Image (cartoon, rainbow, N blue to C red):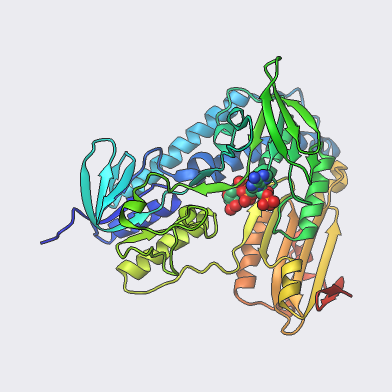
Amino acid sequence: MTRYDFDLFVIGGGSGGVRAARLAAAMGKRVAIAEEYRFGGTCVIRGCVPKKLFVYASQFPEHFEDAAGYGWTVGERSFSWLALIAAKDREIDRLEGLYRKGLETNGAEILETRAEIAGDHRVRLLSSGQEVTAEKILVAVGGHPNPHPEMPGSELCISSNEAFHLEELPKSIAITGGGYIAVEFANIFAGLGVETTLVYRGEEILRGFDMDMRVNLREAMEKKGIQVICRDTIVEVAQAADGRLKAQTHNGHVFNVDKVMMALGRQPNTKGLGLESVGVELDAKGAIRVDDYSRTNVDYIWALGDVTDRVQLTPVAIHEAMCFIETEYKDNPTKPDHDLIATAVFSQPEIGTVGLPEHVAAERYEELEVYLAKFRPMKATLSGRDERTVMKLIVNAADRKVVGAHILGHEAGEMAQLIGIALKGGCTKDDFDRTMAVHPTASEELVTMYQPSYRVKNGERV
Ligand code: NDP
């Protein structure tokens, strides 16, 4: 006789939680999954997916302008923010439905409630107060935008959560932060015609990325009219008499804007989850500490995805969920592989990247060959748009392995996915050289950069 109500109880219906619940249920396990908001999690409901739809929406004005160079006359045009929001919401509803259906058809029990750990193997369902038991508990509750309460006026600001549901498109916005979300939304708002200012405390946007990507993207954003202010930060936001907001920076800039958006990182959703009641260890940022197999220090509790703050990306959470299933239910111990994760910033132009940026590769390897190409994309010839594509390969001179690939340009995210396979497979520069080009494409540059642009020896460019 089974001691527990469920074999697996998953707390959190985002990308990681849903994948684990669905796969375990498909194997005949008795699975429950609790979600307090909407199935699909940050990625589907208020992250990657609606963001990408917004990116598409924001690109049309440039398409209309570029059309003239190709002989088109585009007539009068107008944009309805509310129509975009409604269309986006319909698509999100559809996707949420698919997530639910995947769980239901595999036999997982869907619980629309907040769930908290109530004691050993016990979970409390807040909607009813009922307690259930489970042999294994998986915590996949994700994170939330850093609310930055130490800044006066932070309560007047929006985060990415609200950006997806604004009642009207602001005329002007100041965004604070210099990471993925700040940069992506700066481009979205600017593309939609919003007067946009980005304020970032560091020397250059997108810390951690290759410097050629960071500098060239910032310059491209400035050309599009986005005001990018680095080495500064918004220190106070106040309501102005005209109903707008007054954002003041450390260095004395004052912006009068309709909205101020904070994109200052995301924090794990571990508060009030009952984790302390059973002694689950957290790190200094409040993320759940896990071992290589996503196990917490409590032997019946696992955690994965953003709540563990390893790599905050949807595909990583899904991969961690699949490794959890392999390890716990298929007798095939599998550690999530966090090496060489290809990623994209959906700025305009996009960044697609995999592997090491030059400054990190230079610390790790004695000698590097760096291949760098900067060129005008073909479409920009007739459109006359002043833009550049940048491609960069970083090669360890000792064994010729390509250890970093960085692309700034149209569809860079799509390219990063494919070049990610090459790097994961350990391809050398010689493999790239003997790969036939696809002509005419932008990505052919990746296999036709025959001579290094420069070398880096013992950290010094030579
Ligand atoms: P990021 O970690 O990318 O960036 C946070 C930014 O906020 C950094 O520029 C950081 O500065 C700055 N910051 C943090 N605290 C402060 C502070 N107190 N004062 C001033 N600035 C501060 O987080 P995001 O919120 O942009 O995104 C969260 C995560 O979501 C990302 O890490 C990413 O993994 C994921 N994501 C992925 C996307 C994609 O794949 N395309 C899109 C959107 C999000 P500093 O650099 O100096 O520390």
Q: Is residue 188 left or right of residue 324?
A: right
Residue drawn at (74%, 84%), measured in percent from left and top? 398
Q: Residue lying farthest left? A: 1
Q: Residue at x 31, y 48 (%)?
A: 33
Residue 112: percent from the left, percent from the top? 32, 39
Name the one closer to the observer, 74 or 19.
19
Q: Position of residue 186 (x, y in %)?
A: 71, 39
Can residue 452 be spotted in the picture?
A: no
Q: Is residue 58 above or below residue 377?
A: above
Relative to 366, does residue 255 appear above or below in the rendering? above
Q: Relative to the observer, which residue lies in front, 226 or 135?
A: 135
Judging depth in this view, the residue of 24 and 198 nearest the camera is: 198
What residue occupies the far top of the structure in this picture? 242
Q: Residue furthest bottom?
A: 398
Q: Quadrant of the N terminus?
A: bottom left
Q: Quadrant of the C terminus?
A: bottom right
Q: How many marks?
A: 0
Q: Nearer the viewer, residue 308 or 345?
A: 308
Quadrant of the image occupied by residue 224: top right
Residue 290 location (% of width, % of height): 43, 64
Q: Is residue 143 left or right of residue 152?
A: left
Quadrant of the rendered structure where residue 334 is? bottom left
- Residue 313, position in %: x, y? 54, 54
Q: Is residue 183 visible?
A: yes
Location of residue 162 (image quadrant): top right
